[in-house]
Image: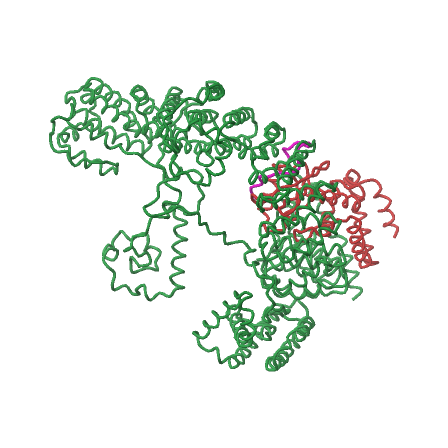
Chain colours: A red, B green
Amino acid sequence: MIKAILVFNNHGKPRLSKFYQYFNEDMQQQIIKETFQLVSKRDDNVCNFLEGGSLIGGSDYKLIYRHYATLYFVFCVDSSESELGILDLIQVFVETLDKCFENVCELDLIFHADAAHQVLDELVMGGMVLQTNMADILCRLQEQNKMQKTEAGISAAPARAVSAVKSMNLPQQLRDMKLPDLPQAIKDLKF
Amino acid sequence: MALKKVKGNFERMFDKNLTDLVRGIRNNKDNEAKYIAQCMEEIKVELRQDNIGVKANAVAKLTYLQMLGYDISWAIFNIIEVMSSNKFTYKRIGYLAASQSFHADSELLMLTTNMIRKDLNAQNQYEAGLALSGLSCFISHDLARDLANDIMTLMSSTKPYLRMKAVLMMYKVFLRYPEALRPAFPKLKEKLEDPDPGVQSAAVNVVCELARKNPKNYLSLAPVFFKLMTTSTNNWMLIKIIKLFGALTPLEPRLGKKLIEPLTNLIHSTSAMSLLYECINTVIAVLISISSGMPGHAASVQLCVQKLRILIEDSDQNLKYLGLLAMSRILKSHPKSVQAHKDLVLSCLDDKDESIRLRALGLLYGMVSKKNLMEIVKKLMVHMERAEGTLYRDELLMRIIEICSQNNYQHVVDFEWYVTVLVELTEMETSAKHGCTLAAQLTEVGARVADVRAFAARECGALCAWAAAALPTPPGPASREVLYAAAYVLAEYCQEESVVRECISSLLSCAGVGGAQMRARAVCVHSALKLCARLLLTYERRRDLDAALAIIRETLSGIRPLLCSEDMEVQERAHNAFALLVIVLHRLNPDDPALQVDGFVMPVSVTSLSNQTATLVEHEQSNGLEKEESEELTNGEETSQGFSGGLIEELASLFEGELKPVAPKAQKKVPMPSDLNLDKWLSRDRWSSESSSSEGEGEEGAVFTVQQEDARPLSQFTPEELHMLKEARRQEQANNPHYLKDDSPRSYQQDDIPIAELALEVPLQVHSKRSDKYLKETTKKTKKEKRHTKKRKNKPEKYSTESESEEEGEELCSRPAVEAGGELPEGAAPSDDEPPPHDDPHRALDLDLDLPLREEELLTSRIHQYPSPESGLLGKKKESKKNKTSAKISTEKVSNKKKEKKTKRNKDIDLMLSEVDKNDVVENLLIDNIEKSKSDEHTKQNVTNDKNDEYVKNKTEKHRKSKKELKKDRESKKNKLSKKDKHETKRGYEEALGISTPSKEVI
């Protein structure tokens, strides 16, 4: 069983957290903090397994993590999971995110944590691995997003337009967002 | 309507959406908390609006804030509202929020039952999938019970996506509602051979999780898995299956034999490291479980170890780590094969990766032998000096102690070496916790190994001397603790006059410093008195009055500053010691200048009484000191007993006698005195919380007289009451620090042995590696040195069997006797009967899955307290199909149905009933319920009184437990019994819940 999946950046700021066992919010933050402290002090060329998280789990649990650029992806699993398997799973997760966001970066997770959760939900369910085939996962996600789009239909257009304008007005946006978004926003405006 | 919609959308445009929130937080880095508080207020306003879109937006923002650590449980009702929206977009937001913030004990969770049921049965597979994903995160017992049937139906859906999710979901259902396991199991088994690989894999996953905790129930599935293993190519599934076999083989050796071949083939053929690794793991499990007689056994072990060696030598740190992990598993059963790779393990100790070093350390435990222990420990100590992180350093220290002390110091030949190591470890100054461990070791070695006592005392004396020499710098945290033991060991075992002479003053100066954290101070004072008494006895026997006077004077002057110590314990002990010594001094030399100078403390009282030695006796008693025989002493007896007239002998005898190690469970084994009745009330006002604490005061009469007029004698308590009381008492004891807890695992007997602590003042200067000289000695010396050896007595056989073979040659080299075990009360035998932990949900899942299903076990979709017509009826239809039972029941059902419909017809379907509505429903149901229970009453006339009830209960239990041998009997009994069973279940529900649901009635 997977007990928790945590994504945080190099400074320990949570970007995505999923607990498959209940902890209250304070405890969740403490766990993230502790995990960050454990993981962040390790070199990049050491192994990806870690024992000794005191708050989460116990002797049967391990932290398995991967470090991509500015983000740590940490899975807390018990002994029924294969260690190398989970490493692969993290890879699948990140690759899927990459496909969904087109060159995923930390900003994508910051602004679209909900979308990342949707990806994760297709990958893991209730702490058990659901699907590991990336093509399948992407297909499921696309179909669901399509449903959402048809629902939104014409009535959502004004709202989209306004949010696009709001996005444009902020100078921050220029720094934050990638340039290719701009034409898209203009297209929405015309409508 | 449309206008409203447009308007709603228009308003929405100017709300903050999630992106705005995130951006806002990023722009307000300095006053984030304030900004979020402001946003929370906005969200609360938004949640109050009618527009579901606005609400969804607010909930999405809440989900984000939850991740940042804000409690959003207050919004649970709004989240449920959003979940119940018809739009998939909003549903998604709602379910995400629910899965992040709900949990099994959330309030209002029961509101979701029918909504989730509706979603599960939705046309669109993604809506159902969404509901399953969400539910998996917060399913509660009630939800599991009510929805089990719907989820089971989904297991045979036409869509693989839903089948897969439903199968996984069932595991969560089982955990919360174990009763579902047996009825659902056949279907789960079916899914193992589902045409869709995803579903198959999910089923394997679930069975693996189940079997991990209760493997014996799943042995019957072994053939199915075996087939899957040999045919499947899905590595994920293979890994799970192979892991499952690892859990099954210990129970069925034949399975293991069958597995070896295909696993070996996989090991040779696969290119996937993860699969290879799991194969090795399972082969190891097989090898552990089967006896070594099997052909090819040794070859398999060899293959595993070789493959693991390749993994460990790999440059990939992950493989290295896993290799070591698997090695440690082999180590338990085949230590020799692993020992061959000692070089490899030792080289891993130098790895830069802490995880790997820790793993390698774990392996060392099994690699030590008498020959290489010193060498390995030396290496570890070098590491300890270099180690940077405290975690690793601490781990090293614990490991050193662990490998040395394992199996009652099995591998330690030279205890002088070990004591030196302990002293050196103390000098490295670790934390107080490890100081305690070291102190415990020092005491234990002293208590168990008689031969090393003199040496240990000398070392401890040196420790104290160093601590004293370093004054006024107080000792570090570790040596502070070790000093506690050192003072004890020193005073207890030291026989050398010169050492004793020196140590008294250093002990006393140690007692003067350290402040409150230093527990060792009082022990130092006490130890000084002990040593002084011993020394006096020696002098008296030698008739050396001057030396005796000198030592008393010296000790008195050392104690004097402690008489007004700020530490109560130190002060008390100092006064005791001082008074005793003054009495002795007065006897030896009434005109001694030390007595005159004093004027400070006792002279008045003591000198006036000092002729009446009886006072001394009383004094001791009041101090609770141990004394052997002192009744001989009478007034002014100055005959043949040396210059003190027996007084010194008397004093020394106070400290005589050897303290032996106490077995860890000795306290538990003390037999209960036959006349002790703990269930009897001591005082009458038993319900007042005072009764236990105030028993001594004011109510002696009630406490100590036989209580006859106690309002309620023991016999009147029902078993439940007694149990309750016992439980309450246990609880109280658990919270009371004065009781010994019985379940604390103690590796060292430090709690049982009175440990005297000594304060070591300074990080003692290290004389470079004194322990090394032992290593050199042993390498040089031709194992000839004879130490007088008592043969180890009562050494447990299990140790000797495994160690004998490998150490035959080494037995030549003698090893001092180590006292094993510990003292137990008479007649008690050591045993290891630890009850398993109680809180594991898997215990409830330990069910026999091969027994045929009983009728009452069949899952029926249970209708919730707030039934909505469609789902309720839907469930009913299924039931009616399933439960084609007797005509009587069905008629009852029909009538129930009618009542149901009546109540439901005027109820709103919508989940979002207003409060009033809900109350109405509950009321109606309750009325309904009363009516129903009335009608029940006369259907079960045969079960009227309690006795009868109990009888049935017993029967039911037996019935449950009955295994195959009862099968035939059951056939005949079934009719009768099952009838009774049914009634029984019914009753149980009504008593427990107070609300009965129609579906239960139907059963």
In the rendered view, would you say A135 is above or below B141? above
Q: Tag count in the figure?
A: 0
In the rendered structure, the answer to whether residue B522 lies left or right of residue A184 reads left
Point 21% across, 28% down: residue: B601
Task: Residue A124: say if magenta.
Answer: no
In the rendered view, would you say B253 is above or below B876? above
Magenta stretch in the rendered image: A40-55
- Report whether residue B529 is seen: yes
Q: Nearer the viewer, residue B918 or B941?
A: B941
In the rendered view, would you say B405 is above or below B698? above
Say which quarter of the image contains residue B1002: bottom right
In the rendered view, would you say B243 is above or below B188? above
Q: Nearer the viewer, residue B181 or B484?
A: B181
Q: Nearer the viewer, residue B411 or B566?
A: B411
In the rendered structure, the answer to whether residue B789 lies left or right of residue B288 reads left
Position of the C terminus of chain B, as image quadrant, is bottom right
Say which quarter of the image contains residue B698: bottom left
Task: Residue A53: say if magenta.
Answer: yes
**Residue B324 spot, x, y in % from top left:** 62, 36
Q: Nearer the viewer, residue B377 or B717?
A: B377
Position of the N terminus of chain B, as image quadrant, is bottom right
**Residue B197 spot, x, y in % from top left:** 75, 54
**Residue A65 spot, x, y in % from top left:** 67, 40
- Report whether residue B518 is seen: no
- Most common SS among magenta residues: loop
**Residue B504 spot, x, y in % from top left:** 30, 23
In the rendered structure, the answer to whether residue B830 lies left or right of residue A165 reads left
